[in-house]
Amino acid sequence: KNQVEQSPQSLIILEGKNCTLQCNYTVSPFSNLRWYKQDTGRGPVSLTIMTFSENTKSNGRYTATLDADTKQSSLHITASQLSDSASYICVVRNTGNQFYFGTGTSLTVIP
Amino acid sequence: GAVVSQHPSRVICKSGTSVKIECRSLDFQATTMFWYRQFPKQSLMLMATSNEGSKATYEQGVEKDKFLINHASLTLSTLTVTSAHPEDSSFYICSARTSGRLDTQYFGPGTRLTVL
């Protein structure tokens, strides 16, 4: 069964600290994996996209990793800011053009 | 990156009325658009897949006669909530799918529907 699981479900960190969000998937055959950030009351915004051959990709303070063998991805946020408070959603696409959504990680950054 | 807009961003209506939400891909053509519903603190739930020029494909449990979808052009899809009821109050988000190797979805900003 094609599934995408994210952990933790929620996370609270102090401003300035780093954190790592996890995404494990069983989607096959794999095409790409994208991390989205969704602010409350807004649509998701793409952060990074990972294809099969990519292991690490950075976008500012966001760094995504992908291990296609173990079917795991992580999103590392460096030097967190209050504006990082949001839900982070992992979406995996298979080669059949189907998209599978994780349930998201709710991140709260406190001063 | 690709831009998707939605209109309106918020709408309040009386029970029994119909509401139309527009989703536009502003700088690319989208043969496929998706409509999602999201309740507070929950994940996105796919309602239907809309293909340009053909009938939408609805997910199980979604009433096609209640949620009318029209995808008349490569840049516009509309969702009409007919005879809305308070339980239809939700956050509705559309996305448009790009084609190519990095085939992915770009999301609109969402529409907050409140049915009184």
Image (cartoon, rainbow, N blue to C red):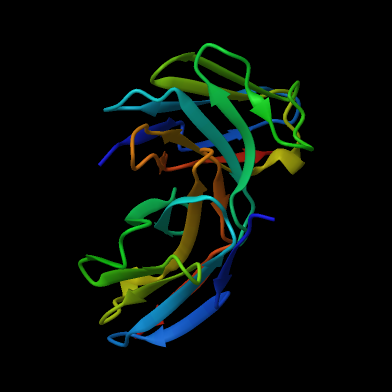
Is B58 displayed left or right of A20 in the figure? right
Q: Residue A69 location in percent, x, y?
A: 47, 69
Q: Residue A77 location in percent, x, y?
A: 32, 76
**Residue at the extreme left of the image, as rendered:** A60
Above/below status of B95 relative to A83: above
Above/below status of B101 relative to B33: below
The residue shown at (36%, 28%) is: B25
The residue shown at (70%, 23%) is: B82
Q: Look at the image and tell me in which quarter the C terminus of chain A lies.
A: bottom left
The image quadrant that residue B49 belongs to is top right
Q: Residue B23 location in percent, x, y?
A: 45, 28
Q: Nearer the viewer, residue A18 or A98?
A: A98
Q: Residue B71 location in percent, x, y?
A: 52, 17
The image quadrant that residue B61 belongs to is top right
Q: Nearer the viewer, residue B1 or A97?
A: A97
Is A62 displayed left or right of B57 in the figure? left
Above/below status of A91 relative to A21: above
Q: Look at the image and tell me in which quarter the N terminus of chain A lies.
A: bottom right
Above/below status of B75 relative to A91: above
For the image shown, how many numbered marks are present on the structure? Answer: 0
